[in-house]
Image (cartoon, helix red, strand yellow):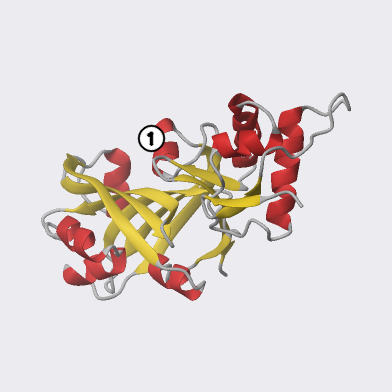
Amino acid sequence: MTPLFQEGGACVSEPVEALSRGAGLAAWRQIADALESEIAAGKLAQGTQLPTEAVLAMRFGVNRHTVRRALGTLAERGLIRASQGRGTFVEAPPLAYPIGRRTRFSEIVTGAGREPWGDLVAQAEVQADAEGAALLGIGEGAPLIELVTVHRADGVPLSTARTWLPLPRFAGFAEAYAASGSITRALAACGVPDYTRLSTRIRARLADPAEAARLDLTPGRVVIVVSSVNVDGAGVPVQANRAVFAADRVEVVVGT
């Protein structure tokens, strides 16, 4: 029996797992297929950290460049996720994300048995442009607070968003969000105990470099962009939001 040792949370064989040489199938493709099979069979469960490139290179008897190409292919297909400074992990199945009159990130993620959290990346005071003014029902040039956030499930980033709220009504929103990690709780702290969705627009595009970095995506991956406006109980717009979801991590479900 080939001896096993533990590395990065997974057992790997040492020193070499034979590849088919001269069979017309590149070594990196064989490695990708072998790892994909282990993921499909549950040998590498969701959330499992993969061994390092060096260990995989030893396992398959190839150089690290070959391993890196195999891992890149799996990342492009949404099967694994490379997190800078932490390692490479098996992706979880897509999370069903319903969108309707009452869309609540924390409730959706909790309902799926995962732990939700939101990180405040940046905040700034800006002036409403023509589009933002129309969405929020305010004058062009009126002051807004703009937030950049990342929303996670079990620590995995599902979406990153830009959010705009009118000032001075929501002057304390950023601090409330940073403390709670929740849009709903931050709105409640600012005197909006409940809100509903006024409009939603959905499209797909490629992630820009900043979005890819925040979502732990390889460059060029597809994202789902969900632009929305929420209103308070009186029907007054309180929030315009543009959320960018990693397309392989969510399944958007539109309610009727």
Q: Is residue 206 above or below residue 11?
A: above
* In the image: residue 80, left or right of residue 165: right
* In the image: residue 250, left or right of residue 186: right
Residue 250 visible? The answer is yes
Occupied quadrant, residue 102: bottom left
Q: Is residue 151 above or below residue 234?
A: above
**Residue 128: x, y in percent?**
22, 42
Kindly identify the residue that appears in the image at 77 percent across and 52 percent down: 1
* In the image: residue 140, left or right of residue 246: left
Kindly identify the residue that appears in the image at 53 percent across and 55 percent down: 9
**Residue 206: x, y in percent?**
53, 35
Q: Which residue is at the far right?
A: 23
**Residue 217: x, y in percent?**
49, 40
The residue type indicated by label 1 comes to Ala
Kindly identify the residue that appears in the image at 63 percent across and 26 percent down: 63
Q: Nearer the viewer, residue 228 or 26?
A: 26
Residue 191 visible? The answer is no
**Residue 150: x, y in percent?**
35, 51
Q: Which residue is mark 1?
A: 210
Q: Nearer the viewer, residue 12 or 201?
A: 12
Q: Nearer the viewer, residue 177 or 233?
A: 177
The quadrant in which the C terminus is found is bottom right
Kindly identify the residue that appears in the image at 48 percent across and 36 percent down: 207
Q: Is residue 69 above or below residue 228?
A: above
Neighbours of disc 1 within 10 Å: few (<14), some (14-19), many (20+): few
How many labels were placed on the picture?
A: 1
Q: Nearer the viewer, residue 97 or 213?
A: 213
Helix, strand or loop at label 1? It is helix
